[in-house]
Amino acid sequence: MNVIAEIDAVYGRGRSPTKPAVAPSLADAFAQLGVERSDVWGWDNYTRVIRHLAAIYGARRLLEIGGGRSPHFAPAELADMGVELTVNDISANELVRLPAVYRTACFDVAGDLIRSAALPNTYNLAFSKMVFEHVEDGERAWRNLHQLLTPGGVGIAFLPTLFALPFALNKLLPDGIAERLIKLVNNERNDETSPVFPARYSKSYAVERWLRPMFDRIGYREVMIVPFYGHVYYRRFPIVRDIHAQFTKLARAKDWRLFTSYAYIVVRK
């Protein structure tokens, strides 16, 4: 089902797909997704979530932050969704690897937007995956995103969170040591297809009361944090893996936000 059909199904035929009669809250939008608070659900459903948000909010101009050489959607998928995607990255060398069919924008989401080619009030939906933990100043990144979004626009960042032990160590250890450890426990990470970049974890939390004052200062109308529990970093260590699985089950049941591994942080301007 394409974006237009999804909007028709939600709002009823005959209404404008770009301007639904009443835009739902973020909570209502996510209530339709059947969210499960596991890392597997978060990874497996992120594409579905982006498509759903585009449909619900009638988004036509999308921005992928940190998409680089591997954008989230193929050109055929974008055509099916009826949207226009701009792929962003901090590195021009990454963007030149893209087919010419993609629009690109080279700027740092946590940098100086005035001196970049980024245009304010441009995008209806902006999304990123495993990017925001790498920025030096998380608040500035979310403030810049607020400028880039149109009124009513939605931003979503899928990111690892403190204080899961692998990510806490990644933050505390020197970059070179952290990189070697990540590659040791996850053999899918390599310099060619999945490089390891220094992570800073600025504002990378799933505890809403810690983040709410920042988002209020910036001026977002809505904020929602979708927490996920569990990760694969202990899969090579059976005893630790099994203990972690039991603790994860308890943390998920109690919704102990200090022990999330990942989160979707979702905002609406």
Image: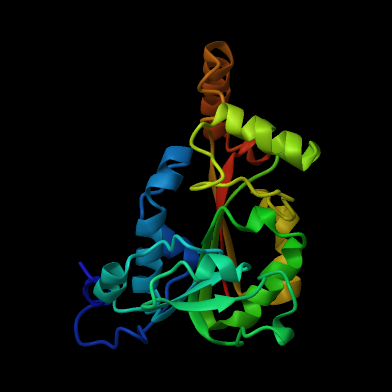
> Residue at the spot x=41%, y=48% of the render?
35
Q: Which of 37 and 98 is in front in this view?
A: 98
How far across and how far down the image is residue 210, in percent? 74, 54
Q: In which quarter of the image is the N terminus?
A: bottom left
Establish if 3 lies above or below 263: below
Residue 192 in sight = yes
* Image quarter of residue 239: top right
Q: Which of 57 and 129 is in front in this view?
A: 129
> Residue at the spot x=39%, y=81% of the render?
60
> Residue at the spot x=69%, y=42% of the render?
162
Residue 36 placement, left or right of 110: left
> Residue at the spot x=39%, y=77% of the render?
100
* Image quarter of residue 49: bottom left
Farthest top residue in view: 239
Residue 190 placement, left or right of 5: right
Residue 190 placement, left or right of 133: left
How far across and how far down the image is residue 142, in percent? 67, 69
Residue 53 placement, left or right of 172: left
Q: In which quarter of the image is the C terminus?
A: bottom right
